[in-house]
Image (cartoon, rainbow, N blue to C red):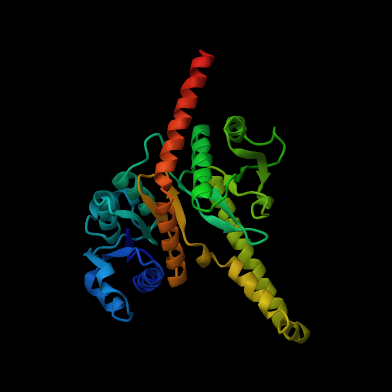
């Protein structure tokens, strides 16, 4: 298996990407890495590490797409950028099973659609990060920002793609699906969520109904379905609240001698809490619905985050997630045709 890594798509590039990839190669003996970016800089960063040179390849691409550029214009114009070169390789080489980038989210999403293409039947691909939950579990949030204006049928597809992901990659046989709304009652929500609610009830999935944002990380759900606007607000709220709580906890401890002394007996508990809340351990956000595996890592991803994201890419490829999503879209299309016939 080959995986292509955009080596210049993040704040800590290229060292974070290279350090994470080298660790990935050590633990995954059946994988090769292709870096795209400035060859001289990549080689310079690689010189700091010991690795199997026969499993590392470099595609020279001197340009970089920044967060300030128009995604569509940059993808079309900057053909020698590390990101565009990664997409070109991903599309043209069947042995390359997936790619990872920490670059501009807009450019990654745009390039995925324009260069790689959507799975047949998928109307809108969606970003689907995993968030930590109470009890040490994970919940998939789909969509978290790729599609801010949605129709009901988009969200129905989001739910099906997320179910495929959590079943085949995370190993959940019957993932619990919740629709993000303003109340748990069946009649709550706006026109969009009410229509989606009725559609999800008809699908052969474990749909628990509406859920409120306060229960997002409760551990009671495995999948949260939302349009990209609501999903992004929810994601940023969870991240901000978690950061605030950790900061306030640290501040309160530092103000009290007794609290400082008490932390000596709680080091293990605090270490576990910090680990569970660290986004670097969760990798990146898969872009579900395109013809190859694409994972978008955080712009500030460190080597640990890159390693976790590469593990994600491999697990998704090993599970044939793209093929399974394609199959679900075909089933949904057949079901829709059948229902239309009955209505006629």
Q: Is residue 67 visible?
A: no
Instruction: Out of 253 and 199, give the one closest to the viewer.
Output: 199
Locate residue 253: give its quadrant: bottom right
Relative image position of residue 84 (x, y in whole percent): 27, 55
Vertical relation: 341 (above or below) 247: above
In percent of width and height, residue 8 lies at 32, 66
Residue 105 x, y percent position in the rendering: 41, 55
- Name the residue rendered at 31%, 64% in the picture: 32
Indicate the position of residue 224 as horizontal and vertical percent values: 59, 46
Q: In this view, does 291 lie above or below 187?
A: below
In the picture, which quadrant includes the N terminus?
A: bottom left
Q: Relative to 304, is 119 on the left or the right?
A: left
Residue at 38% in and 74% down: 19
- Give the residue furthest to the right: 258
Query: Could one spot residue 146 in this view of the protein?
Result: yes
Residue 154 located left or right of residue 263: left
């Amino acid at each position: 298996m080959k995986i292509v890594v955009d080596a210049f798509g993040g704040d800590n590039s290229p060292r974070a990407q290279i350090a994470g990839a080298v660790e990935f190669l050590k633990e995954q003996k059946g994988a090769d890495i292709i870096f795209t970016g400035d060859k001289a800089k990549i080689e310079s960063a690689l010189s700091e590490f010991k690795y199997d040179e026969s499993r590392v390849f470099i595609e020279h691409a001197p340009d970089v797409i920044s967060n300030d550029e128009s995604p569509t214009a940059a993808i079309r114009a900057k053909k020698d950028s590390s990101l565009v070169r990664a997409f070109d390789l991903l599309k043209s080489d069947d042995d390359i099973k997936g790619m990872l980038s920490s670059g501009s989210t807009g450019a990654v999403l745009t390039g995925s659609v324009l260069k790689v293409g959507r799975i047949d039947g998928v109307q809108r691909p969606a970003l689907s990060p995993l968030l930590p939950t109470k009890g040490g579990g994970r919940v998939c949030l789909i969509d978290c920002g790729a599609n801010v204006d949605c129709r009901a049928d988009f969200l129905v597809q989001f739910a099906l793609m997320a179910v495929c992901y959590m079943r085949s990659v995370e190993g959940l046989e019957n993932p619990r699906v919740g629709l993000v709304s303003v109340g748990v009652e069946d009649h709550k929500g706006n026109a969009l969520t009410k229509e989606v609610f009725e559609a999800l009830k008809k699908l052969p999935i474990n749909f628990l109904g509406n859920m409120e944002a306060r229960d997002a990380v409760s551990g009671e759900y495995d999948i949260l379905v939302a349009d990209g606007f609501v999903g992004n607000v929810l994601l940023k709220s969870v991240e901000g609240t978690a950061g605030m709580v950790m900061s306030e906890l640290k501040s309160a401890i530092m103000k009290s001698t007794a609290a400082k002394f008490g932390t000596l007996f709680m080091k293990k508990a605090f270490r576990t809490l910090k680990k569970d809340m660290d986004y670097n351990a969760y990798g990146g956000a898969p872009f579900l619905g395109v013809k190859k595996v694409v994972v978008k890592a955080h712009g500030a991803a460190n080597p640990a985050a890159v390693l976790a994201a590469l593990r994600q890419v491999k697990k998704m490829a090993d599970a044939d997630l793209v093929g399974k999503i394609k199959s679900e879209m075909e089933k949904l299309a057949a079901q829709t045709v059948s229902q239309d016939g009955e209505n006629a």
